[in-house]
Image (tube, helix red, strand yellow):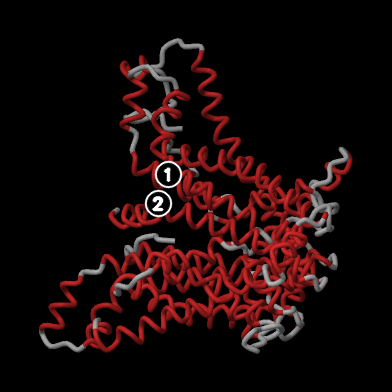
Amino acid sequence: MADVGAPAPPGSGPATRLLDGRPGVDLSAVGRRAARIGGPALAVTYLSLLVLLPLAALLSNALSGGPAAFWRAVTQPEAVAALELTLVASLIVALVNSVAGLAIAWVLVRDQFRGKALVSALIDLPFALPTVVAGLTLLALYGPDSPFGVNLAGTRLGIGCALAFVTLPFCVRSVQPVLAELDRETEEAAASLGAKNTQVVRRIVLPSIAPAVLAGAGLAFARAVGEFGSVVLISGNLPFKTEVASSWIFSLSQSGDLSAASAVSVVLVLISLSVLLAIGWMRRRFDAPETV
Amino acid sequence: MTGRWRWPLRIGALGYLAVLVALPVGTVFYRAFDHGLAAAWDAITTTDALHALWLTVLVACIAVPLDTIFGVGVSLILARHRFPGAWLLDAFVDIPLALSPVVIGLSLILVYGKTGWFGNWLAARGITVIFSVPGIVMASAAVALPYVVREVLPVLQELGTEQEQAARTLGAGPWAVFRRITLPNIRRGLAYGITLTTARVLGEFGAVAIVSGAIAGKTETLTLYISDSIENLDPAGAYTGAVVLALFALAVLTVLTVTDRRRESWHGRAAK
């Protein structure tokens, strides 16, 4: 603990101790010491019970049958199909939403129109809306009873829509603040020197917001890879066609095959963790603000 | 970028948002009240629906305070003390954000389920966690774990310790310092974090679906009730349930917009 070095953190002693710098004979110090160790211990216990132990169990279950069993669980045809669909769909959605998110962020920052505050609030709606409700809303509009006659239920496009819905805020909110703080003078200078609009965007705007766009895409991808609630209603979970990795894990665990479910989960966890670590590295590298 | 590109951009961006978000959400409201208010009321007051609603509120009443206490505690520890392994604690808190809810649920089963690590120990004491309310609470608390820390920690770090130390030299005890100095300062961040936590807990589906077994009238939360209603071809129940949750989400958005913490934290963090 950090008793060495000044200033002493609060909780390390009473006022008299702060002044003379040495611990006196103080009975209540015992209680405080207990509280100081007790607090972190409680926090770590809570974290362990809810997250760390379960994750350790996941890893141990995935590897309980040895590496061969792990490999079999991960490479069985339905698992491969589910993982492939999840990764490809997430990648496409991340790309599409990066473009759309950039456009929306641009409109929010640079454009002026009535009801902008409402649009801004609307972007956060997918954050606030429960995933299963998100799935239901898409099903209501683009399902079997679609008022437009567009039925995406049981299609991969439907999965794409669900993933796009839940990941849109990441793509908008990571770009928006960077765009807002962008120095307009550089753009104006370039324009006054004869640069065309497209040149200004390509040479000045895009390079400075590229890390933020990439970070947004990465967050969207990491979220999409594990998404379940919004996808499950519209996808219909058709094996080899619209079954995403999290649905596959779900059905494996329902049928009691916990070690196979764990193995696929570990793959999923590794993918999203490595994406998030890459984003963290990139943010430090480019000094991009942490926004979402 | 005025002129030629303004309208195409505006229409493209807002159109995408409308087709993807606004229209679908509007449709759910329309569908829920399609057959009148009375029908919607009947759909949400069935025994199963009411039980689901009650269970959802109960779970939130347990999980949100737990996560809040943990969140404030960990933020204080990380912001005010230096100790080996602090960065590890900081990183571990974020883990649930990186995991699929289904994976979180599954890993809880592996520890607390019948065949799990603690399965025998719990069974010997007659405690059922999985397929029961405690499991639902744990799953909800686990997925929503990081939000309070993520909102409160940056505020505490920016705040510094000067005010707290001043209060301490004037003789205030730790609890008085927390209540009179720290708490008022982190108030908005904390409100923001609690709102996000509540939204996540009330709306959690994947993690809860896997640990609860979704037994109607017993371990079915509102989100599970919605998906169950769709599977049982009872769209009226699903739409009304969805509207209840959507209304809550709108309330959350209002709180977030009013407290407007997001903007503040953007500028705060960007400046660092």
A64 up-or-down from A197: above or below: above
Between the C-alphas of marks 2 and 1, the distance is: 7 Å
Amino acid type of the residue that numbered disc 2 sits on in the rendered structure: Arg
Q: Chain of mark 1?
A: B
Residue A76: percent from left, percent from top: 76, 80
| Circles 2 and 1: CB atoms closer than 8 Å | yes
**Residue A250 lies in what quarter of the image?**
bottom right
**A291, A58: nearer the viewer:** A291
Secondary structure beneath disc 2? helix
Q: Residue at (68%, 68%) from the top-left corner?
A: B32
Amino acid type of the residue that numbered disc 1 sits on in the rendered structure: Arg
Q: Residue at (65%, 89%) from the top-left corner?
A: A149
**Residue B10 lies in what quarter of the image?**
bottom left
Q: Residue at (73%, 62%) from the top-left corner?
A: B38
A32 up-or-down from B263: above or below: above
Residue B218: percent from left, percent from top: 83, 52
Q: Estimate how packed mark 2 is, as few (under 14), some (14 to 19) or many (20 or more) residues with alpha carbons within 10 Å.
A: some
**In this view of the protein, can residue A148 be seen by the observer?**
yes
Q: Which residue is mark 2?
A: B261
**In this view of the protein, can residue A58 be seen by the observer?**
no
Of labels 2 and 1, earlier in sequence is 1
A4 up-or-down from B32: above or below: above
Same subunit, labels 2 and 1: the answer reads yes
Residue A229: percent from left, percent from top: 67, 68
For the C terminus of chain A, which image quadrant?
A: bottom left
Q: Chain of mark 2?
A: B
Secondary structure beneath disc 1? helix
Q: Estimate how packed mark 1 is, as few (under 14), some (14 to 19) or many (20 or more) residues with alpha carbons within 10 Å.
A: some
Q: Which residue is mark 1?
A: B188
